[in-house]
Image (cartoon, rainbow, N blue to C red):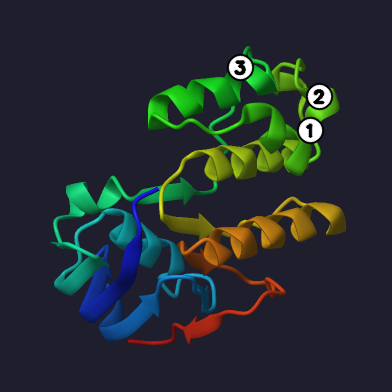
């Protein structure tokens, strides 16, 4: 995993459908830290995450990843550092849980341990079950395992606690905490407390 020094956002403005979601947004997340983005529905939490990932271009402002040796501003290049967990679970109905995770380790070029990831998220006994038979919470656990295997230093998580029971929420929080403990950065959009040490950014009317 490439080591990051920080994620720096300066004077960021987001506009979707002609509506200003946020304007002049500034924040910095240092290596080893998590940032929780909070706000009402429609405040721009998902749009902000998509901008950080390089999926959307901001209307104004800069997003910069700093490593020991370089600064990365280009959205496509920045995306190479990012692990994404969104609302879509990326679980193919016909593929087993184990096949899905092996596919993503190859896609990411990761040497991650699929069997260990299955144990961590509590899906070892369901490893041979096709995705079509998983509950929403089990699919979210697969998505969490996929994120843990991606070997990317910037994690961007959109409502990672949705569909999870109490045990699953503890798994999600533990994975984020472990990622940060190894020097990673996590930015999490959530309506629920993540129950780990994190900085807070509350989005409101622009």
> Which residue shows up at 24% across the image and 53% down it?
78
Badges 1 and 2: C-beta atoms under 8 Å apart? yes
Residue 100 position by quadrant: top right
Q: Which residue is mark 1?
A: 123
Look at the picture and state if 11 lies above or below 165.
below
**Given the current orientation, which residue lies at the most extreme top position?**
94
Residue density around tag 2, few if under 14, some if 14–19, many if 20 or more, within 10 Å: some
* Numbered-mark total: 3
Q: CA distance from mark 3 to mark 2?
A: 12 Å
> Which residue shows up at 36% across the image and 67% down it?
48
Whether residue 163 is visible to the viewer of this picture, yes or no, is yes
> Which residue shows up at 32% across the image and 87% down it?
206
Q: CA distance from mark 3 to mark 1?
A: 13 Å
Residue 137 x, y percent position in the rendering: 76, 43
In the foreground, 39 or 188: 188
Q: Which residue is mark 3?
A: 99
Residue 133 x, y percent position in the rendering: 77, 22
Residue density around tag 3, few if under 14, some if 14–19, many if 20 or more, within 10 Å: some
Q: What element does badge 3 sit on?
A: helix
Q: What element does badge 2 sit on?
A: helix
> Which residue shows up at 78% across the image and 34% down it?
135
Q: Which residue is mark 2?
A: 126
Residue density around tag 1, few if under 14, some if 14–19, many if 20 or more, within 10 Å: many
Q: Is residue 91 left or right of residue 173?
A: left
Closer to the chain start, of discs 3 and 2, is 3
Whether residue 92 is visible to the viewer of this picture, yes or no, is no
Q: What element does badge 1 sit on?
A: loop
Residue 179 x, y percent position in the rendering: 55, 58
Closer to the chain start, of discs 3 and 1, is 3
Q: Is residue 50 left or right of residue 148?
A: left
């Amino acid at each position: 995993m490439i080591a990051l020094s920080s994620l720096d956002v300066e004077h960021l403005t987001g506009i979707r459908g002609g509506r200003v979601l946020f304007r002049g947004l500034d924040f910095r997340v240092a290596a080893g830290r998590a940032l929780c983005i909070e706000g009402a529905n429609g405040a721009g939490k998902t749009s902000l995450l998509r901008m950080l990932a390089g999926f959307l271009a901001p209307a104004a402002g800069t997003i910069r990843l700093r490593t020991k040796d370089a600064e990365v501003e280009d959205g496509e290049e920045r995306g190479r550092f990012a692990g994404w967990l969104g609302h879509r679970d990326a679980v193919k109905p016909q593929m087993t849980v184990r096949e899905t995770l092996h596919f993503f380790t190859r896609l990411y070029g990761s040497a991650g341990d699929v069997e260990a990831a299955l144990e961590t998220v509590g899906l070892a006994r369901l490893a041979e079950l096709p995705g079509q038979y998983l509950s929403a919470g089990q699919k979210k656990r697969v998505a969490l395992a996929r994120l843990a295997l991606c070997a990317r230093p910037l994690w961007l998580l959109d409502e990672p606690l949705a569909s999870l029971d109490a045990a699953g929420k503890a798994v999600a929080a533990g994975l984020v905490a472990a990622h940060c403990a190894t020097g990673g950065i996590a930015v999490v959009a959530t309506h629920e407390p993540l129950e780990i040490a994190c900085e807070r950014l509350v989005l409101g009317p622009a």
